Image (cartoon, rainbow, N blue to C red):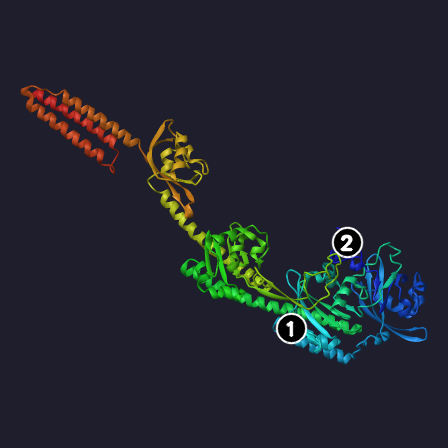
Amino acid sequence: MDSPAFGQADLTNCERELIHLAGSVQPHGALLVLREPDLTVLQASANTGAVLGQPVGQLLEKALASVDAGLARVVVQLAERDLLEPVPLQHHGRRGEQDLVLEGHLHRVAGVGLVLELEDIRAAGDLDAALELSHETLMACLGQGVQRFTAAATLGMLADAAVQVVRDLTGYDRVMVYRFDPDGHGKIIAEARDPRLDPLLGHHYPATDIPQRARELYLRNRVRILVNVDYEPQALVPDLLPTTGAPLDMSMCTLRSMSPLHLQYLRNMGVTGTLVASLVREGRLWGLIAAHHYSPRQIRYSVRAAVDLLAEVVSTRLAAIENYTYAQVSLMVRRLEQRLVEATSTEGDWRHALFRNPRTLLQPVEATGAALFHGGEVLTCGEVPSTPELRALAQWVDGQSFDGPLACSSVAKAEPTLASLTPTACGVLAVKLSTSRPDYLMWFRKEQLQTLTWAGNPIKAYEGNDPLQLSPRRSFEAWSEIVRGTALPWSSSEQALARAVGMALVDIILQVNAVRLLIAQHQLTQIRETVGSSREPVVIADEQGRLLFSNAAFEQLVGVAGGGVVGTPVADLFVHRETMASLLDTLSMQPWRGELALRCGGDPGELPVEVRAEAVPGRHGLLLGFIFTMVDLRESKRAAAARQHLEDALRSAAVGSPATEGARGADQVISAILTNASLAAMDIAEATDGPPVAPLLEELEASTQRAAMLYGLIRNFTR
């Protein structure tokens, strides 16, 4: 997008006007561009004849020494510096038959040369006095001013002191401190004025009143003066530099012409002369000290420099006042941190302690409600939206990209779908507590109707009924606007407190989790030892069915050290892995018990086991994993086979016994032997905690057979 040349902009493109390439100066001084090192005049303003006594045509391509040797010596001496910023100079010379007293500045433009600006101080007497103060008076004013600034404990006291000191020093009709908000709009927060003037204190001005390029120049060139709004600009001759073919960069020139739009703006306000000093905080334009006069006014360099110094002291004091606020924030956060750490050690949870006294959490940031989103839970205090609305807000906040606290004074404007939050959470201040989870601490402010008093209608950029006739606002009568759907903006100190509280909570969470990790590690070690030494084979799998742990009993059962590789599917441990895989899908609904076959490391055959399988649920229905407890069925199967074999043998013995009448006594003996064996088999089979059953049954069978054999021998012998 093209940038309009100086003087060619209107209200639709004034943000891009090339105001640093003005190509002309205000007529109370003259400008010379000098080539180094011979100080040849390359370019000069058209009014050199009125200021220096020599027309511009006679100066071009001449060495400065041939024009004024004394002035050339001053310039040569100053040229030994880097001159990145203008340095002052003073020179006494002659203009024809008249003595000449010149004040000015000298700075260097890279690739071009030296820029010399000169003002005729004596001629300034016609412009409401040059305000020449004695050295003693000036130093006294500075000393008293700095003392007043140092004594200011609040921003309001500092601003009030600044406007009064600057007005006393400069004599302007009105002096204001003009502060920018985060959106670039300005507000007059302090004013010292002639009592005949209407007050402007508290008035707001839209950001468009000061274009961005002008703000950038205010950062570079801290003090700007306009002597007479109705001046006749004096063009630079030639209009382009002969060495570069480009216009001169006048960013650091004190005489630089001002944009015609800005001049019309001042005329519409009825202002004739201005003095503006920048207030800079952390490299950004915090605000301005703006002085207005209603007739032409020029002041000496020493007074301008004094205003520059005072503005610098005010900026420093701003930092001190805000840092004091931050120090109070740090003290409060340390107390909060101590209280939460104590609550953690005594109660095991810092979260409830955070909300135990809502006033200590809400009052420092002037919030009406707060919510903590942590570990999937929501804790609140004060006036807050419903839990579903809070979760929707947290989801929106989590989707934003921000470094430090997220400060929003109108959630509904930022995200219209959250408009229902306006009554209780119109404004939100949020800090992130985790980099991996959507954990936040948020403060809320209710909607607050605001009545803003503007210096004229900020929306009305044109006069009459023709919107094509754009011009700066002409009406600066107080114009009120009721702003709805917003909360009071979060101040920088409130955001600093939120950041500090967030960092403290992150530290506390880290400490708590570190302690919990140690406790959990100790408990895990103990539990591993307990489960690991259990006589029952146990396998533990994660929620995906991957092997996490198997104890020694299981490893001994399958005959493989490690039982299986951690991370492999637990279904791979079984002969019919598809059966186990489908079983995992149903375990979350109910436990399962049944018989399966394990893969055995030592034997090629199957290893029958009884499996008790169950899923372990976590919080909010999440699945933690699975536990499989097993019983080796080999011994029970062998015992069952031995018992069956014994029963078969006993039945055969009963069938084969003599059935004659003479053998009735013998049958009684055999019957008693078989009955004894049968009862013994039942007792052995039911004794689950004793030695293996199968060998005992086999031994019982052998003993019974031997008893039957011995009885046969006895019967045959006695017969």
Residue that sits furthest to the left in the current view? 662
Rate crowding at label 1 as few (under 14), some (14 to 19) or many (20 or more) other CA atoms within 10 Å.
many
Hey, what amino acid is under mark 2? Ser
Q: Is residue 186 visible?
A: yes
Q: Closer to the observer: label 1 or label 2? A: 2
Corner quadrant of residue 684: top left
Rate crowding at label 2 as few (under 14), some (14 to 19) or many (20 or more) other CA atoms within 10 Å.
few
Q: Secondary structure at mark 1?
A: helix
Quarter of the image with the C terminus in it: top left
Image vertical order of residue 509 relative to residue 653, above or below: below
Residue positioned 22% across, 36% down in the render: 687
Q: CA distance from mark 1 to mark 2?
A: 39 Å
Left or right, 105 with reference to 448: right
Hey, what amino acid is under mark 1? Leu
Q: Position of residue 353 (x, y in %)?
A: 44, 61
Residue positioned 19% across, 34% down in the render: 683
Looking at the image, tell me whether mark 1 or mark 2 is earlier in sequence order: 2
Image vertical order of residue 170 relative to residue 683, above or below: below
Query: 599 or 417, which is in the foreground?
Result: 417
Q: Which residue in the structure is indicated by mark 1?
A: 158
Q: Secondary structure at mark 2?
A: loop
Q: Position of residue 613 (x, y in %)?
A: 36, 38
Q: Position of residue 685 (x, y in %)?
A: 22, 33
Q: Position of residue 75 (x, y in %)?
A: 86, 67
Image vertical order of residue 439 relative to residue 334, above or below: above
Q: Which residue in the structure is indicated by mark 2?
A: 3
